Amino acid sequence: MFRRILIANRGEIALRIIRACREMDIQTVAVYSEADRHAHYLDLADERICIGGGPAAESYLNIPRIISAAEIADVDAVHPGYGFLAESSHFAEICESCNIAFIGPSAAILAAMGDKVEARKIAQRCKVPVVPGSDGAVENESQAQEVARKIGYPVMIKAAAGGGGRGMRTAHNDISLVKSFIAARSEAEATFKSPILYIEKYVEQPRHVEIQVLADRFGNALHLGERDCTIQRRHQKLIEESPSPALNKSIRRELADAAVRLCKEVEYVGVGTVEFLVDPARNYYFIEMNTRIQVEHPVSELVTGMDLIKEQLLTTCGERLRMRQKEIRFEGCAIECRINAEDPGFGFKPSPGLIDGFVLPGGPGVRVDTHAYSGYRISSFYDSLVAKLLVHRGTRREAIATMRRALGEFVVGGIKTNIPLHEQIFGHTKFLRGDFDTGFIENVMALA
C-alpha cells in the first residue's frame, strides 16, 4: 500500500481523499493555491505545500510545481481527484517518468479514452453501441455538412478532447452547422488545446445514464450499478440518482455488461465511469468514459456500502479486487444534489463571496460532503460547488421526501445558491414521476 500521497486537487474532493487515507494509515500532502490558504481541510493533511497563485494555471494546473512538491514531500503517489489534471495523460506520463505512482489508469489508457474519437472506435470494437456519427475526426465545415446530411439533422458537434459540456454545439441545418462548427472548434482549441472535432447524431429526449466500474491489474472488472444523471443544465449535472427510474432489468443488465466489456477491452485499472445516452425507445449509446473518480461517486457508495476512494487506492497500488460481481448488493435509492454558488434567478450567475452562515441538514438517511463552513470564502477562480447533499432511503419516494426535508434545513448565508431550484425540481410532477430527459431544466423549468 502507498505510504504517502500528494493530493493534486482542492476543496471537497481533497477532503474526501484525506479522510479515506487517514482511515488507511496513509500520510497525505495537500497542495494549495494562495486563494485556498485558509481552507480548514488543509489542517487534516500531514503536510501542506503552497504551489502558486489563485488562478488554476498558476497552481492546480501547473504540472512542474505539483511534481516539485511531490519530490520535496517524498511521496510515492499522486491522487488527482476529479477535474484539473485528473484525466491528463501528459501529467500521468510525467508522474510515471518520475517514479511517482499516478492514482488512476495508465497514461496510455488516459490518452485513448480521453480522445472521444478513439474511444468510439474502441467501443465499436467490443460491440458497445455508439451514436451514429463520423468515422473519425471532421476536418472542416464542408466535411461536417457531408456527414450531417448522411446521418440526418439534428447533429451534435463535439470536441475529441472534450468534457464537461465544453466544445459541444447542436446544429439543425447546414447554415447553423457552419456557425456551430466554428464556435465549437474555437472553444475546443481554447479549452483543451486541441481543435479536433467529430460529429454525432443528436439523440432527442435522451436520459443520461452512467455505469460505475472498478477494475484491477489482473483483468478483473465489475460494475457498481448505474447513476441517472439526466437532470442537468448545459451538459452540467445537477442531480444524480441510483437506481435510474427509467431502466428496466434487461436494459440495466445490458448497460452494465457493456461497461464491463469496455473496461476489459482497454485493460482498465481503478475506478471509472462509462456514460451512455438512452433514448425514449430504450436504445442506448456509448458517449464517453470518465477515467477518474466522479463528483457523484457517493451515490454509488450509498447503494453498495463501498468506499470508492479506498477501492481506487487499493486497485491502483496493485491489489486484486476484494469481491466478485455476485457479492455486490444494491440497497435502496440514493440521490445527490449539487449545491452550487450561483443564482438561478439571474441566469445562473456565479455567486462567489463570504459564507456568513452555514447550517447543514442531518437526520436519518442524510449525508453532506463539503469543505465549506461559516467564514469560508467561495473563490471566483474555481468551480462553484459548495456541497454535495445526498440521501439514501429504501425507495425513491422515501428518498425524495428526505431530500425535500434536507433542502429545507440547508442554510448557506452570504451568497446565492441553487437550493431554491432544487426545491422546485423535487416538487415538480414530472420529476416525481421520473418522466424527464436532459432538456428538463431548459424546456420544462424554462431556465437557460
Image: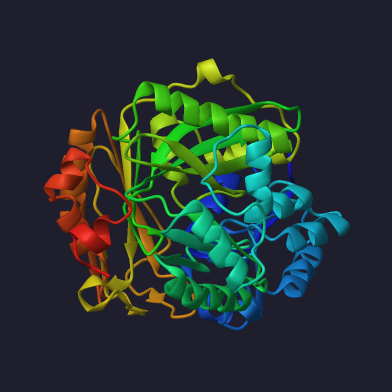
What is the x, y in percent for residue 148? 51, 60
50 left or right of 393? right
Q: Is residue 90 above or below residue 202?
A: below
440 or 348: nearer the eye?
440
Q: Residue at x 59, y 21 (%)?
A: 323
What is the x, y in percent for residue 336? 33, 48
Q: Residue at x 45, y 37 (%)?
A: 284
What is the x, y in percent for residue 8? 64, 63
Quadrant of the image occupied by residue 207: top left
Q: Is residue 78 visible?
A: yes
The structure's colour scheme is: rainbow
What is the x, y in percent for residue 59? 64, 76
225 or 78: nearer the eye?
225
Q: Residue at x 60, y 34 (%)?
A: 214
Q: Is residue 309 above or below residue 416?
A: above
Of all residues, the one furthest to the top in this rendering is 326
**Looking at the image, how many numbered discs can be counted on the residues?**
0
288 left or right of 346? right
Q: Residue at x 71, y 34 (%)?
A: 265
195 or 74: nearer the eye?
195
Quadrant for the C terminus in the image:
bottom left
Quadrant for the N terminus in the image:
top right
Quadrant of the image occupied by residue 130: top right
Q: Is residue 24 visible?
A: no
139 or 295: nearer the eye?
139
